[in-house]
Image (cartoon, rainbow, N blue to C red):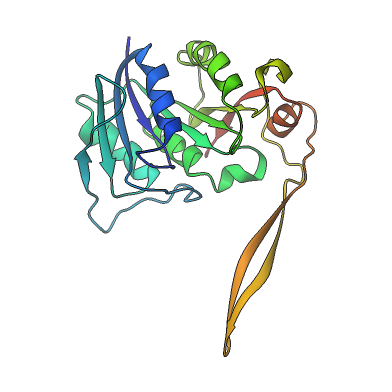
Amino acid sequence: MYKILIANDDGITSEGLVRLARTAKKFGEVWVVAPESQRSAMSHYSTFWDGVDVWPVDFPVSDVHAFACSGTPADCVRLGAIAVVPGGPDRIFCGINIGYNIASDIQYSATVGAALEGAGLKIHTIAFSEEYDGLHEVTEKYIDQITSELISSPLGKNEVWNVNFPGCALSECNGILYDCKVSDDDFDIVGYNVTAKDGDKITYQVDYKRTWKGSEGTDLYAVVNKYVSVGKVKNIS
């Protein structure tokens, strides 16, 4: 059995975090260190010059040691691994993130950023994500199986496992695609809309448009075609 640290970027009250803790309990002792509130799209941002607070919280999964943190998702992993979990964790899980972490989104993802912090600490780490506002049927069907497979599957230096569950009905899911590469196909077309003007000051609001296509063998291809995507993400050499 493993000593498992769980972090996320959606915050300590995220239901995805709760579901991941329930899965993790099947594999060992579980510790949670998660942001006090939403911290999405913070990438690998870390706190170095200011203090970071950590405090215990009630958690809806029994026998889980849970703490909220005033810092970033990467802070949660580093603090959790070095200062909170006695002796440090054997494994780190990040997620379950609300929204895919695939293709160009990975560079912004604080879920993957937190996971890469774990890799930098030389701890075996898995990141889990699913479609935003999607169904959970596929996640619930496959997460135990995939966790069992990946929890001891080798990773290279500065690598993490990255898992994305499609938000379709289980009856529509086509299974699991392994060894998915990070897609470099067009994914986000980003523009800006003017939402307010005050003298010379202009307020812009980002406008995302998805281009839902992906080359075969990539993470984007997998989720668009209703497969679970399993692959590796590498930080630096």
Relative image position of residue 195 (x, y in whole percent): 62, 73
Give the quarter of the image for residue 178. Answer: top right
Q: Is residue 164 left or right of residue 44?
A: right
Figure check: 27 above or below 110:
above
Q: Quadrant of residue 2?
A: top left
42 lies above or below 12: below
Residue 148 vertical position relative to residue 188 in the rendered view, above or below: above
Q: Position of residue 144 (x, y in %)?
A: 49, 13
In this view, the residue in front, 158 or 3, is: 3
The quarter of the displayed image where residue 187 is located: top right
User: Is 36 positioned to the left or the right of 39 in the image?
Assistant: left
Q: Position of residue 46 (x, y in %)?
A: 37, 50
Residue at the limit of the structure toward the bottom, as seen here? 199
Work out which quarter of the rendered image holds the N terminus and state it.
top left
Q: Is residue 237 visible?
A: no
Nearest the camera: 60 or 173? 60
For the point 66% across and 18% down, which residue is it? Answer: 170
Q: Residue at x 38, y 19 (%)?
A: 22
Q: Residue at x 70, y 22 (%)?
A: 227
Left or right: 27 with respect to 147?
left
Residue in front for this viewpoint, 127 or 196: 196
Task: Report x, y in % for residue 216.
Answer: 80, 28
The foreground one among 154 and 66 is: 66
Do we see residue 63 in this rendering? yes
